[in-house]
Amino acid sequence: MDIKNLRVDYNKNRIDFNNILKDPIDYFNLWFKEALQTEINEANSCVLSTVDCLNNPNSRVVLLKYIEENSFIFFTNYDSAKSRDILKNNNVALNFYWGTLERQVRINGCAEKISELNSDQYFNERPKKSQLSTLISKQSSNINLSCDLNLQMKQIEEKYKGKTIKRPSNWGGFKVIPNRIEFWQGRPSRLHDRLVYTFDQNWAVKRLAP
């Protein structure tokens, strides 16, 4: 494989530095709508990076579900590795990459649990099988190599047939409150456009070198 020669010369768009928005959340919403309109598969997927108690970094893909009160909200099992990391050190990073648009958005901030009421509201809107999977999976724990999760799903479907499923107390949402948001637009010859917002009582904006 000739990996060293895999490259793309980006040229699809650019950032107009003379007409930027004051609020990065508004800017994110603008880019996010464009990502949805280009029919990018799971445009709401992003890489969540955390640090564990031994200062080891961990990254995984999660799905953004809401943008509310200037925060980015995703849902997970509170017993998962990502949740344990956050409860030890709530400094996190999100990275959205939309290759079709040659764009990425990097978000740094602090994560905290959302209210139980808001977690209940989202849980109740989920498809029933998604609700049931939260009862089956002890996320990030070791399971037997021969474990038949499909059989467990059939069994629990029968158990809860015709019944309302209550959100488990160890499942819910986190909101990431941003303090830094960088918008990256690929440009020809690797002279990429980079626009960064940082928060200290108010949002300040700067341009970064490629």
Image: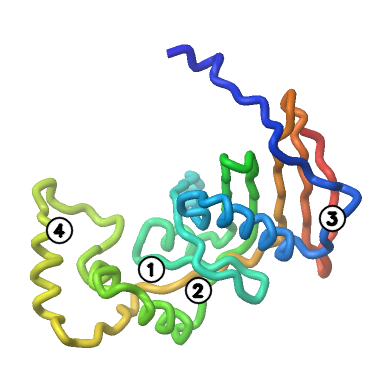
Q: Which residue is mark 1?
A: 78
Q: Does the image show residue 178? A: yes
Pointers 2 and 1 in contact (C-beta within 8 Å): yes
Measured Cα–Cα span from mark 1 to mark 4: 20 Å
Q: Which residue is mark 2?
A: 113
Could you tell me which secondary element the residue under label 3 belongs to?
loop
- Residue at 51 percent across and 49 percent down: it is 40
Closer to the camera: disc 4 or disc 3?
A: 3
Point out residue 63 in the picture as x, y percentages from the top left corner: 46, 59
Q: Nearer the viewer, residue 98 or 153?
A: 98
Q: Which residue is mark 3?
A: 20
Pointers 1 and 4 in contact (C-beta within 8 Å): no
- Residue at 35 percent across and 74 percent down: it is 126
Tell me the quadrant of the picture where the N terminus can be found.
top left
- Residue at 13 percent across and 59 percent down: it is 150
- Residue at 44 percent across and 49 percent down: it is 60
- Tell me which label, 3 or 1, sits earlier in the chain: 3
Measured Cα–Cα span from mark 2 to mark 1: 9 Å
